[in-house]
Image: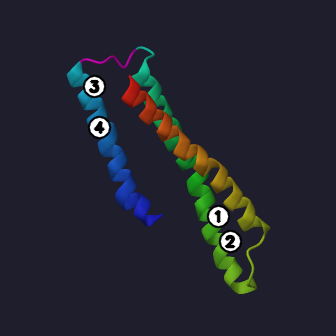
Amino acid sequence: MLADFIFTLPGILLLIGSGVWMTHELGYSLSELNWLTISLALFALTGLLWLTVLLPSQRAMIKHSRQALDSGTLGPAYQRASRVWDLFGIIAVILPLLILYFMTTK
């Protein structure tokens, strides 16, 4: 999780900032529904997914894996958190691929 905050978060901020700056420089409109606004909405949805589902699931897995050190087995709470992380992690990978599609086929 520390690596996410050190490497991923600055990259995301740089990506958003440079993208908004370039669209402004090239005269693209952010006020109408187009490939750009759909991409930005999907990007925001991906971020929301990370903040509301994936990071809490990751924290839960860390917590339950520490508890497993005492008992020797991963319990159902860990398994539940892991399944949630797997499902929403797949969605969080597919959304940027859709963004890439919109960005390259505009």
Q: Amino acid at mark 4?
A: Gly
Q: Earlier in the sequence, mark 1 or mark 4?
A: 4
Which of the numbered marks, if any, corresponds to residue 83? none
The residue tagged 4 is 17
Helix, strand or loop status at disc 1:
helix
Q: Is residue 29 magenta?
A: yes
Q: Amino acid at mark 2?
A: His
Q: CA distance from mark 3 to mark 4?
A: 10 Å
Q: Are the two marked residues, 2 and 1, in contact with CB atoms closer than 8 angstroms?
A: yes
Q: Residue at x 58, y 53 (%)?
A: 54
Q: CA distance from mark 2 to mark 1?
A: 6 Å
The residue tagged 3 is 23
Which of the numbered marks, if any, corresponds to residue 60? 1
Main SS category, magenta section = loop
Q: Earlier in the sequence, mark 1 or mark 3?
A: 3
Q: Residue at x 45, y 16 (%)?
A: 33
Q: Are the two marked residues, 2 and 3, in contact with CB atoms closer than 8 angstroms?
A: no
Which of the numbered marks, if any, corresponds to residue 64? 2
Q: Are the two marked residues, 1 and 3, in contact with CB atoms closer than 8 angstroms?
A: no
**Relative side of 80 to 43, left or right:** right
In the image, 105 versus 51, the foreground residue is 105
Q: CA distance from mark 1 to mark 3?
A: 39 Å
Instruction: Assess disc 3: are there few (<14), some (14-19) or many (≥20) residues with their C-alpha within 10 Å of its C-alpha.
Output: few
Q: CA distance from mark 1 to mark 4?
A: 32 Å
Q: Amino acid at mark 3?
A: Thr
In the rendered image, residue 97, in percent from the top left (x then y), is placed at: 48, 39
Magenta part of the chain? 27-31
Q: Earlier in the sequence, mark 2 or mark 3?
A: 3
